[in-house]
Image: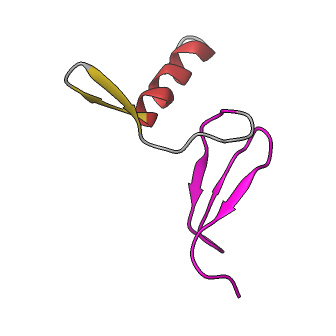
Amino acid sequence: MPKNKDESQKAIVRTYYIIEGDKIKLKNKKCPRCGSIMAHHMKPVERWACGKCGYTEFIGKGK
């Protein structure tokens, strides 16, 4: 169990990046509006969504 909030956030932040040799690469997309990391959602419709500003990109065919 983490002692403080900072330790728990560090563990989560590591899941957003891939380390390849000397380079660090972001796994997810960055929001074009605010620059935050976007989340990929599959249901009910596949989309990329920013939790900070609300920007959403829908993927695939619409109804």
Taking 17 as reference, is 46 left or right?
right
Number of marks in the image? Answer: 0
Residue at image location 60% in from the left, 37% down from the top = 37
The image shows residue 1 at horizontal and vertical percentages of: 49, 21
The image shows residue 47 at horizontal and vertical percentages of: 62, 63
Residue at image location 53% in from the left, 22% down from the top = 8
In this orientation, which residue lies closer to the viewer: 35 or 37? Answer: 35
In this orientation, which residue lies closer to the viewer: 18 or 61? Answer: 61
Using the image, determine if residue 15 lies above or below residue 38: above
Taking 20 as reference, is 62 left or right?
right
Residue pushed farthest right? 53
Residue pushed farthest bottom? 63
The image shows residue 46 at horizontal and vertical percentages of: 59, 69
Using the image, determine if residue 61 lies above or below residue 52: below
Give, as a single range, the part of the protein colored magenta.
Answer: 35-63
Residue pushed farthest left? 21
Residue pushed farthest front? 32
User: What's the coloring here?
Assistant: secondary structure
In this orientation, which residue lies closer to the viewer: 15 or 8? Answer: 15
Please, what is the dominant secondary structure of the magenta stretch?
loop
Residue at image location 19% in from the left, 23% down from the top = 21
Q: Quadrant of the C terminus?
A: bottom right
Question: Which quarter of the picture shows residue 19?
Answer: top left
The image shows residue 32 at horizontal and vertical percentages of: 67, 41
* Magenta span contains residue 47: yes
Residue at image location 66% in from the left, 33% down from the top = 35
* Magenta span contains residue 39: yes
